[in-house]
Every structure is written in C-alpha cells, then in structure tokens.
Image (cartoon, rainbow, N blue to C red):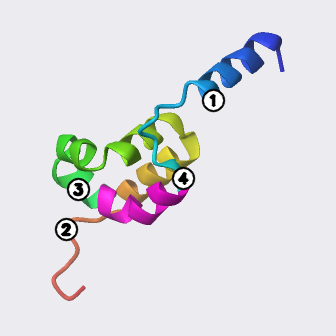
Amino acid sequence: MSKNVNITALDQFLHTDPRDAGCGEAMELLHVYAELVRADPRLAQERYPGVAAHLEACGPCAEDLAGLLAATVDDLPAHY
C-alpha cells in the first residue's frame, strides 16, 4: 500500500462525523432504515442522521443496505 493511501485512510478515520452511529446501531436499525429509504430517502436521513452518517463512511454497512434494498420486493403476489 502506498504512503498516500495510508494517509488518506488515516485522515478519513480521524475525521469521522461525530453523528456517526457506528456499525452496531446501524445494523440494528438497517431494516427499518431501508424501509424508510424506500418510502422517502430524505426522511430516512432526517429521522436517523447517525445511521445516515455511518452509511456515508462505512462501505461494508452501505453495501449491506444496498443488498437489503435490492432484495426488497414490493410486488409479491397476494398469497405471500
């Protein structure tokens, strides 16, 4: 890894948004957050600013949200 990449990663870590809820809280609320994102993305960010800040900073958690959103099916047949 180059020195510039290490400095960038360290700089990113040291400048974490103080609103960042962290992985634990984000994972606890991810299913609720995903439903709200589907309905109104702006409202999701307003209602859960700590989760929104965390998802901006944490690639793995953002990928989990993307997967959850991709797996959500709005038009299931009525018998489900």
Relative vertical location of residue 71 with respect to residue 58 in this rendering, above or below: below
Q: Callout 2: 10 Å neighbours few (<14), some, many (20+)?
A: few
How far apart are labels 2 and 1 at the CA level?
Answer: 40 Å
* Label drawn at residue 23: 4
Q: Earlier in the sequence, mark 3 or mark 1?
A: 1
Q: Earlier in the sequence, mark 3 or mark 4?
A: 4
- The residue at the point 47 percent across, 31 percent down is 17
Q: Is residue 56 magenta?
A: no
- The residue at the point 51 percent across, 35 percent down is 57
- The residue at the point 42 percent across, 49 percent down is 66
Camera-nearest label, 3 or 2: 3
- Look at mark 3 in the image and give the residue it sits on: 36
Relative vertical location of residue 18 with respect to residue 66 in this rendering, above or below: above
Is disc 4 placed on a helix, strand or loop?
Answer: helix
Q: Earlier in the sequence, mark 2 or mark 4?
A: 4
- Look at mark 2 in the image and give the residue it sits on: 75
Relative vertical location of residue 6 with respect to residue 62 in this rendering, above or below: above
Camera-nearest label, 3 or 4: 4
The front one of 18 and 74 is 18
Report the side of 12 relative to 57 (left or right): right
The front one of 11 and 35 is 11
Residue lying farthest front? 18
Which contiguous range is marked in magenta?
Answer: 24-33
Camera-nearest label, 2 or 4: 4
Figure disc tally = 4
* Label drawn at residue 13: 1
